[in-house]
Image: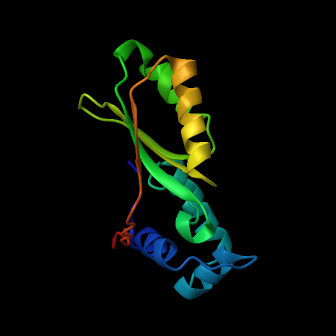
Amino acid sequence: MPIMDKINKTILNNMQVDFPIASRPYKIIADKLGILEDELIQRVRQMKDDMLIRRIGGNFSPDKLGFYSTLCAAKVSLDKVELFTDTVNDYPGVTHNYRRDHKFNIWFTFIAPSRQIIQESLDQISKITGVNNILNLPATNVFKISANFKL
């Protein structure tokens, strides 16, 4: 069972809200928490190994960087789910890909420098997988909320 003691909770609370942009961000966090940098790094590694942390990285607003984003949904037969999801995941602009219990059973988000590149990529995915019913639902109004989880 993963360890979620007070120190790990404090580490996660700090990392998800105010991760320092610095050459040694873990030292800054460790100093703030009153622990050694090596201990903090070991705890973060262990939480990743225990899958308490899935990913450490920045979240960017595509439109502010000149990119376009879209939500896609596809009707994929069960025998093609693996091929379809593997194909979709090969595209660097895909940020999420998940299965739902719905007639449109595979959903994914796609970010690219242009709407044309997104459409061309969706056309390629259809050609490779034989899945022709992919909905392209581009973002028209973006509403961002902060998804921070106080532990």
Question: Which residue is farthest left?
Answer: 102
The reply, left or right, for residue 79 in relation to residue 87 is left
* Pick the front one: 87 or 26: 87
Q: Is residue 30 above or below residue 73?
A: below
Q: Quadrant of residue 23?
A: bottom right
Question: Quick check: can you spot residue 60?
Answer: no
Q: Up-down: is 90 above or below 70?
A: above
Give the image location of residue 16, x and y in percent: 47, 71
- Quarter of the image where one finds residue 81: top left
Q: Is residue 52 left or right of residue 57?
A: left
The relative height of residue 75 versus residue 56 in the rendered view (above or below) is: above
Q: Nearer the viewer, residue 16 or 118?
A: 118
Horizontal arrangement in the rendering, residue 133 relative to residue 25 (left or right): left
Q: Residue furthest top?
A: 79
Q: Position of residue 39 (x, y in %)?
A: 61, 69
What's the colour scheme?
rainbow
User: Which residue is at 56% across, 20% downward?
Assistant: 127
Q: Position of residue 75 (x, y in %)?
A: 34, 26
- The residue under the point 45% across, 73% down is 7
Q: Residue furthest right?
A: 23
Residue at point 48% right, 48% down? 50
Q: Position of residue 98 (x, y in %)?
A: 39, 38
| Residue 15 in view of the camera | yes
Q: How many marks?
A: 0
Residue nearest the viewer, comparing 113 with 51: 113
Assign the C terminus to one quadrant of the image.
bottom left
Taking the image as shown, residue 128 lies to the left or right of residue 103, namely right
Of the pair 129 and 6, the residue shown nearer to us: 129
